[in-house]
Amino acid sequence: MAANPPFATAVAGGQASIEDYGEIVTIDPAFDSDTDEDVDETVNEGVAAVKAYIIDSDEESTNLEVEALDVEFLPSREQKAAIARSKLKKYTIYSVAIIIVLVVAITVPLSFTVLKSDPPDISDAPSYMPSSAPSQAPTSVLYYDYFNKLSEISDPKLLMTPKTAQYRAIRWLYHDDQAGLRNLSDERLFQRYIAAVFYYSTSEGRGWYDCYPGDGQCTSEGEEWFSLSDECKWYGLKCDQNDFVIRIIIEKNANGVPTKHGNGLNGTLPSELGYLTTLKELIIERNPLLTGPIPSTFSKLTSLRKLRFSFNNLEGPWSEGLLDNMTNLDKLDLAYNDFNMTLPRDIGKRTSLEKLDFAGNKIHGSIPSEYGRLYELSSLKLENNHLTGSLPEELFPSDPKEGLKNLKILKLQNNNLNGTLPEEIGNMKLLEKLDLYVNRFSGSIPAAIGEISNLCCLNLTGNDLTGIVPEALCS
């Protein structure tokens, strides 16, 4: 019997397994050969047909030579391990690639979202605020341009802090302003932003009584705030021919009539108001919930002529140099607030001042002698305070060119003033009202008072004065 090749182990049924090499050989039974020559061919990968010997299970001596077709190779253990490592490597590469794609897909939009300007919504925003988003989302770059621009007049920290007036104002201006975004080069950009800051700063609680944002029944002159119209048309604002605000007057309630409650302003005056450098009149009256000091930035209001904050609850102290640049100021009315301070001496530099009213505060100390330089002053009201000391002689003109020669109204009642009344009081020829009651004045009543021909109202009660009112005055 011919020896079976060492590389093949035959089995009946047409299939040979070559264990040493791990191959499976499919045997074609139709192939038969009489040759007895030894075949020592090895099965090579890729051959179409090979010869193999099959040992017949019944006749061990009989050798059949057959031809194997369609050889299918099975990998050895080493090859299987190599193939597995190759597949693992491929799968690892594919997985890493997919993870990278996913990370990029998530990170890029997230980074734009972080940079995007849309701040979180404010839970306490008024329900009447416009809430519709713009049709096209503005770029974050433009928002930060806005932020940097507005940081020129507002504290950046306030612009970034939710619930502050500045944060809410820039949010409204950038996202909700129905009039659209103003160009950064627009000189009136600050103006609209400042108006928004002013509203948010003074609308705590229930907000304004009249012409608030969304008020469809604004009864006062002008339109509701935050309307689509130019801010020059909003209630209380008036602009010049170049559309710059020159007047702010907030003093009426929902009935359009001045009352002790004004328009319900609640909060504080924002420092940004000081950057409305074209402003000539600033009148906010009768709002008892309006508190806090007058911002030092008001010193920038170089065009201001009228400043009236009466019957609010503003408080001091007064910022040094507040009026230094208000060279055109002619009316200053801070009556019936909560200023606890001495009378500012720098007021004496405002020689154009015509009316000065600090009545009904907590003013203490003496009347500054510098007030004698207010040559144009026609009304001086300092009643119902805690003033002490005597009347400065500088107030009373010794000649027609000095002192308060144009004074018509002098009200100093309900203080703690003392000393005597000077005879020079008679040189105030235009004086019409003189109220000095409930003080600590002493001495005799000056006879020169009788020479003030325009005097119609005189009250000296509640002092330690002696003498009688001059007969000429009574006639």
Image (cartoon, rainbow, N blue to C red):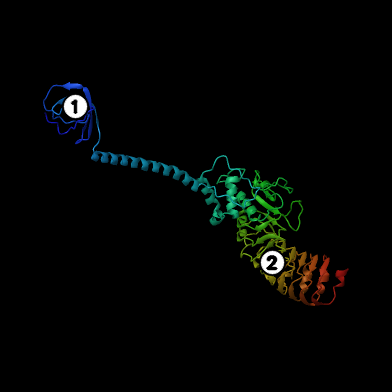
* Amino acid, disc 1: Val
In front here: 444 or 236? 236
Element type at mark 2:
helix
In the image, is residue 76 above or below residue 377?
above
The foreground one among 68 and 272 is: 68
Q: In the image, is 219 to the left or to the right of 111? A: right
Task: Decide if residue 124 is on the left or right side of residue 406.
Answer: left
How far apart are the two marked residues, 2 and 1, measured between alpha carbons? Answer: 128 Å
Identify the disc placed on residue 373. Answer: 2
In the image, 467: left or right of 93? right
Judging by the rendered image, the residue that carries numbered circle 1 is: 50
Image quadrant where residue 202 sits: bottom right
What crowding class fits label 1: few (fewer than 14 Cα within 10 Å), some (14-19), or many (20 or more)? some
Residue 376: in sight, yes or no? no
The local crowd at label 2, few if under 14, some if 14 to 19, many if 20 or more residues have their Cα within 10 Å, is: many
Location of the N terminus by quadrant is top left
- Quarter of the picture containing the C terminus is bottom right
Q: Position of residue 314 (x, y in %)?
A: 67, 62
Of 335 and 246, which appears nearest the observer?
335
Question: Which is more foreground, mark 2 or mark 1?
Answer: 1
Q: Is residue 388 visible?
A: yes
The image quadrant of residue 415 is bottom right
Above or below, comparing residue 2 to residue 136 in the picture: above
Query: What x and y, as percent, mark residue 208?
Result: 69, 53
- Three-letter code for the amino acid on which mark 2 is drawn: Arg
